[in-house]
Structures are given as structure tokens and as C-alpha cells.
Amino acid sequence: MRVRRLRGMTAALAAVAVTALAAACGGGGGVSGSGGGTAKTEVRLGFFPNITHSTALVGVKKGFFAKALGDNVTLKTATFNAGPAATEAIFSDAVDATYIGPNPAINAWSKSKGQAIKIVAGAASGGVYLVVKPGINGPADLKGKKIATPQLGNTQDVALRYWLQEKGLKTDTKGGGDVSIVPQENSQTLQTFATGDIDGAWVPEPFASRLVLESKGKILVNEADLWPNKQFVITHLIVRQQFLKEHPDLVKKLIEGHVEANGYIASDPAGAKEAINSELQDLTGKPLKPEVLDSAFKNITFTNDPIASSLLTSADHAQKVGLLDPVDLNGIYDLKILNEVLSAKGQQAVNDK
């Protein structure tokens, strides 16, 4: 059962709004037990209204999380526009777990000195593109242009900055340089691209497909082409370490719902797309057009494997563009519970290498 949602926040708004939510929830979402301890009665889960977060969309809409958690635990959901806002929610104890991209997870680990979060499951690979105006045919044509990303420091923002750097184009965090990078919410990017206020955007699905199908954009870069075997983590599931320590049973149940959702997506793509679109309509007030949904869905691989090797590369890219200090990621993964769940279902274990 969903009791409350917070939609599409910037990092600044998240710092205020989620702190208020944490206070309203008592910080831990529990009730005092007879022995003076705390019995957890809710799990607070964050995710984005993106196709790359379909594991969450399906898990919520089809009730896989609620079923796994049981009748005595309430699922509360919060939605975010990009990773930095979601990590604010983790830091302020406003959510217990959230679906998120690699770079914000790395930043959360770095800022907390390895104390705030653990990555407990993979969710999705692929589904990210640089979409541009028709007259742009290569990196050289981007000089002097404005390109949007969902948020400064988020996964797509880092990927764009690194790619431009590799092509010899300079950027800075204030929108200067050879290419002006404009962080803005994905919904705003749809408008600014249509009006010509920006020349392109490095965005996840379904926004990439919408820019192509609705505003006659063209794909300049498929990010999958930049990775070995065309595989890279775009979404994984993280939990607060304190939540994992105090409630491993609930983390296991959450992961059971997660694995069930991915299994459903694989076994019934048509049903999954219907559930995804229904949940997106609930969250944003608008379902995706069938052609947009079909285009976006086929561009993503949904997987329980966190594709850990790509996380290390993402960290290296963030360091090279000046958005991350050197960081030791040893210990960022805790895949023990995931592998227990996979083993119980007769599925292959995943690793953190």
C-alpha cells in the first residue's frame, strides 16, 4: 500500500522536504515494542518515474513489494528526478532504500566515508542517449551549444562531461566552456528541447525516446556503445546501512519483491509495459504514448546483476571531470542477501567484481 509520494525534487528542495518527512515518520518508521525496542512497521522506498526504474514501477504497481513485505509492514514510496535528491533522502533518514544510478551512489559512499549506504542489487543496464538537433552530426558541432542533463553530478551528467572531455571539449559546473551543460529536470528538458532553448540532452529513457519521437531529435550517442559488451549499470538498489543492520529481514523481503518484479518483466513484457505505464500515469498524471513506451522499453536490460565493474569505471570518470575526489569503493556492495534470494529461486549468483 502506498501512503505518500514525494515527486521530482531538486536536491535543494529534497533537503527540506525529506527532512520534514523524516520527522513526520519519526525517523525510523516504527512503533515502540513492549521491551522498549522498535518494531518496524513501514519501509520507505525511493525511485524515479523513469523507464530505467521499471523494476520499482512494476514492483509497486503489481504489488510484489507489498506481498513480500507482508500485511504488517506498509510500503511508503517517494519519487525523485535524479540521484542527488535521492541521496539527500538517504542522508536525512527520509527513505530506507532507493533505486538510483551509479554516480550518486558513489558520491553517497564517498561523502559518508563508507558509512551511509550499501548497494544490494542491480536493476537495469542501458537506456541512455545523447539526443541532439538534426543539424548536429558529431562532437565538433557541439561547440557553443547547450546540452541538458538531469542534475549536476548525476550519472548522465558525469557521462556527458567525460565523453566531451574525451572529445577535447571543455566544460565547467557553471555552464561555461566549449559546451554549456544545463542541469534541469527531465520534464523541463522535453520543453526546452522542443522550443530550441537547448540543443540536446544526455538523458535516460523514456525521455530520450520522447525527444526523438515528439521533437524530431536524433541520437548522436548510445551510451551502451561506450561500454564493454554494451553493459553498464544505470540503476541499482541501495539501502541505508543502519536499516540493513537493524532490519535485514525487511531488506531481504524488499529484495524478494525486487527479484519478483524483474522476473515478471522478463516473463511477461507486455504485462510489464502495461504496469509501467499505469504507474507512470499515477505518478506524473500522464501515461506514455505506446510508441514511446515500446521504444524505451526495448532499449533497456533489466537485471539483478549490479555490473560492478562499470561502477568502478564511473567513479574514475567522475574523478577525471572533477566531480569526485579519489575514493576507495571496497565494501560498497553487500550482495549476500540478493544471492540468498537468487539461490532459493534456482538462479545464478552475482558478484561485486
Image (tube, grey):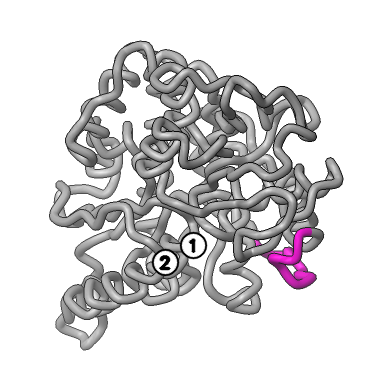
- Callout 1 secondary element: helix
* Residue 343 visible somewhere in the drawing: no
The magenta segment: 321-332
- Callout 2 secondary element: helix
Q: Does the magenta stretch include residue 128?
A: no
Q: Residue 262's spot in the image, x, y percent? A: 44, 29
Identify whether 6 is placed above or below 232: below
Q: Mark 1 points at which residue?
A: 84
Mark 2 or mark 1: whose residue is earlier in sequence: 2
Identify whether 171 is placed above or below 57: below
Kindly identify which numbered label has been placed on residue 11.
2
Q: Residue 239's spot in the image, x, y percent? A: 46, 61
* Relative to 80, 138 lies left or right: right
Q: Residue 350's spot in the image, x, y percent? A: 66, 39
**Amino acid on which disc 2 is placed:** Ala
* Relative to 19, 159 lies left or right: right
Magenta part, dominant SS:
loop
